[in-house]
Image: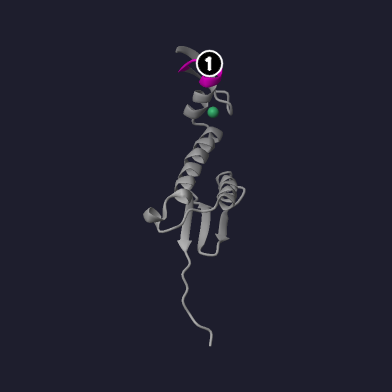
Amino acid sequence: MAMIQGECKYCGQLQNIDAETKEEADQKATEMCECDQAAKEKQHKVVIQRIDEICHASSQDTGFTPIDDDTYKLVCILADKIIDEELEFVKIELSDRILSISKTTRGVVKFRQKKTVEVGIDG
Ligand SMILES: [Zn+2]
């Protein structure tokens, strides 16, 4: 390890980083940077990781069966757009649950899955 000057890939801010390569230094500098774009990238990673955990958690833990791969991919794409504020609110109605993704005015991304249970008759 050596001290290398890393550059945030979004705003170009330089920081001295303990790294093996310039590439690694740039990567770390971007992670540590507090500019808007770097913050969004960080949020993206955290949110997608949490969504991944929820979508693939065992039903014992959550009461929900894991979400299938295609729907999961779709959720990730839509969550991306929510983080980037291209979309404000997304609701996906599956046969057994409703998924929703939104972002509060304070910038917090919310992902929810809600069971839809219905009992009734039509006479
Ligand atoms: Zn930056």
**Residue 47 seen from this side:** yes
Q: Closest to the observer: 39 or 118?
A: 118
Picture residue at 46% right of the left edge, 76% below the top: 119
**Residue 21 in the image: above or below residue 76:** above
Which corner quadrant of the image does residue 92 belong to?
Answer: bottom right
Query: Percent position (x, y) of residue 29?
Result: 50, 24
Amino acid identity at mark 1: Thr
- The reply, left or right, for residue 53 in relation to residue 7 is left
* Ligand 1: quadrant of the figure: top right
The residue carrying mark 1 is 21
**Residue depicted at 51% across the width and 61% down the height:** 98
Residue that extends furthest to the bottom in the rendered view of this protein: 123
Per the image, is 8 magenta? no
What range of the chain is rendered magenta? 17-25
Q: Is residue 113 left or right of residue 80?
A: left
Residue 23, percent from left and from top: 56, 20
